[in-house]
């Protein structure tokens, strides 16, 4: 219950009804209301019912499902976003994307297919 913040390396599973903030490398699957990945590497799938933020110098190796996603880092895996996906200029996505809408800054990279459909 509540929020979780991980500041040391972690391996396991995280399930939270609040916000999960990762500040250190982790190997786990995450189910949460929201997610912030800050300057670290996450290996695992993320199922986020609200918004997810992947900061610059952060990397996710796994699939990401979220209501909204702001990405300034690297994601190697498929992305499914029901609402808005925002890719900043430092974003790198190596996988397929399904999103309600996409905003992509000059310099962002996508290597995969892109599908947009409004709900």
Image (cartoon, rainbow, N blue to C red):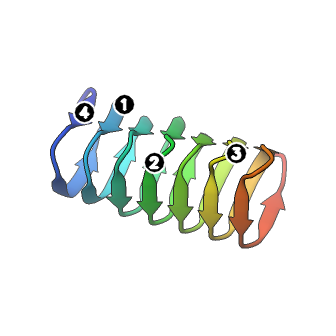
Q: Residues within 10 Å of mark 2 (few under 14, many from 20)?
A: some
Q: Which residue is tagged 4?
A: 4
Residue 83 found in image quarter? top right
Per the rendering, the mark at residue 57 is: 2
Q: Position of residue 95 (x, y in %)?
A: 63, 70
Per the rendering, the mark at residue 27 is: none
Per the rendering, the mark at residue 89 is: 3
Which element carries disc 2, helix, strand or loop? loop
Upstream in the sequence, badge 4 or badge 2? 4
Mark 1–mark 4 contact, CB under 8 Å? yes
* Left or right placement of residue 89 versus residue 17 in this view: right
Q: Residues within 10 Å of mark 4 (few under 14, many from 20)?
A: some
The Cα atoms of the two marked residues, 3 and 2, are separated by: 12 Å
Q: Which residue is tagged 1?
A: 19
Q: Residue furthest right?
A: 117
Question: How many marks can you see?
Answer: 4
Upstream in the sequence, badge 3 or badge 1? 1
The residue lying toward the viewer, choosing from 75 and 35, is: 75
Nearest to viewer (mark 3 / mark 1): 3
Upstream in the sequence, badge 1 or badge 2? 1
Q: Position of residue 24 (x, y in %)?
A: 25, 46
């Amino acid at each position: 219950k509540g929020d979780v913040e991980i500041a040391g390396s972690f391996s396991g599973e995280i399930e939270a009804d609040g916000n999960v903030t990762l500040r250190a490398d982790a190997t786990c699957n995450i189910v949460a209301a929201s997610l912030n990945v800050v300057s670290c590497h996450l290996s695992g799938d993320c199922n986020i019912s609200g918004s997810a933020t992947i900061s610059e110098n952060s990397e996710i190796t796994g699939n990401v499902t979220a209501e909204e996603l702001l990405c300034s880092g690297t994601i190697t895996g498929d992305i499914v976003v029901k609402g808005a996906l925002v890719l900043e200029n430092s974003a790198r996505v190596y996988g397929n994307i399904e999103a309600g809408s996409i905003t992509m800054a000059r310099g962002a990279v996508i290597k995969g297919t892109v599908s947009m459909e409004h709900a």
